[in-house]
Image (cartoon, coloured by chain):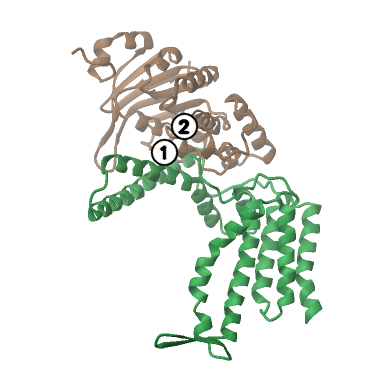
Chain colours: A brown, B green
Amino acid sequence: MEKTVEIVDLSFTYPDGHRGLERVSLGIYSGENVAVIGPNGAGKSTLLLHLNGILRNNGAVRICGLPVQEKNLREMRRKVGLVFQDPEDQLFSLSVFDDVAFGPVNMGYAEAEVKQRVDRALEWVSMMGYGERSSHHLSLGEKKRIAIATVLSLDPDVLALDEPTSNLDPRSKWALIGLLKKLPMTKIIATHDLEMVRILCQRTVVLDGGRVVADGKTSDILGDVALLRAHGLAPSDD
Amino acid sequence: MKHSFIDEYSELDSLIHKLDPRTKLVVALAFVIAVVLTPITSWQAFISYFCVIVVSLVLSKLPLFYVLKRSLVVFPFVLMIALFIPFFKQGEVAGSYNIGLWQVSVTYSGLLVLANVVIKAWLCILSLILLSSTTKLADLLKGLQQFRVPQVIVLILSFMYRYIFVLADEVMRMKQARDSRNFGGRRLHQLKAIGNMIGTLFIRSYERGERVYAAMIARGFDGEVRTMRTLSFGRADAYFGIAFVLALIIPGVLWW
């Protein structure tokens, strides 16, 4: 089976010298749901930003066999839907419709197709009829859904989500988890929410200090209390 | 968080609301130009302008009290500039008063200038309130865009309108956090805290800008702004536009 996401030996240093990622290698197969967990500052978001080339290290990341490089960026951005943590950043247009249409319009689709894609994306996240609303006045749960719709409208092969459940109340959180479960594409979810990981992801990668420190079945990793403790993901003994 | 909107009543349903934003833009601009260029001495023209704007306001179903209240905004500025003109302008003296040592006199031509400024500013602001209250800002910006207003400006206005509420919320939270920690305190100390808040706000906005930009390029933005054209210029637009412009011209024809 072909790997949808293939990362080989990816290192990244921020301009201020701070080490973001160190020799990360990771292969993800089509249809897998992979959780990336780790303490704050472990490099989870940095890793996600490499998936569609917002940060890039030429050739270290391949999506569907294509290296993430300058000349492939357009294709990468269609294939990988990146959902940012704060929907306030993702929803920058004056209406929900404009936000969801932003990707398709940039891809140069015709008007009828853009409309159709927006409708379908809003339907996926159960937000039909919200097109003309302004995103500022939605609830956080609704904003998170619309943020997901803004990338679903591009029909991505890979969905990369940064902390999708952060700050949500339990009801919105479970609704969002239900929604993510329904979506068929490959998912990479950076999160601290181990409850969601248990339900949604078969596989878990633990990242700490920019390195992959564990990679395996979710049940194995979340069962390994010593490992979780060592990386600040479970309360320590005392 | 609830904020008052500049397009608070844009959701109403009326003849004016349904017009294409471009029609409204052109008509409002025409009105402003006509008002500004008409000499104040032809007062009949101003009565007819006033009637035009009142009829439009009634058609728009905007609450009149709201419009009046909003229109008062312009007066501090106008009065600050124009209030003293009657006292300094040379000409026939309308009245002269002795206040202690000073003698103050008001001239007719000065009063005329004051009336000129106040009436024109008020009529213009009424037309702009009508425009901005009956059109959603998003539509207004689309209209500007189709009139070839530079994309950068439209984009800046749109970001401004989108994020001004986010910023206001942020300021409010910072204030609450500050007030819950420093109760009272000396003036100088407070000023320092305000300075820090402004600095922090700037840095946060800057960082948000970077994140928003990342979210834009993540969806294929490459520096070129593409839009879908969804405005439609209908028959009602043509009728309204023609009627409005005729109403503007009639006084000129009648009283010249």
CB under 8 Å between discs 2 and 1: yes
B178 or B163: nearer the eye? B178
The residue where tag 1 is placed is: A54
Q: Position of residue A117 (x, y in %)?
A: 63, 32
Q: Quadrant of residue A153?
A: top right
Helix, strand or loop under label 1: loop
Crowdedness of circle 1 by 10 Å Cα count: few (<14), some, many (20+)?
some
Please give the name of the residue rendered at 48% of the width and 72% of the height, measured from the top-left corner. B80
- Residue furthest to the left: A238
Q: Position of residue B241 (x, y in %)?
A: 76, 60
Tell me which amino acid carries mark 1: Ile
> Mark 2 or mark 1: which comes first in sequence?
1
- Chain holding disc 1: A
Please give the name of the residue rendered at 66% of the width and 65% of the height, measured from the top-left corner. B29
Tell me which amino acid carries mark 2: Leu
Q: Which mark is residue A82?
A: 2
Q: Which mark is residue A98?
A: none
B148 or B44: nearer the eye? B44
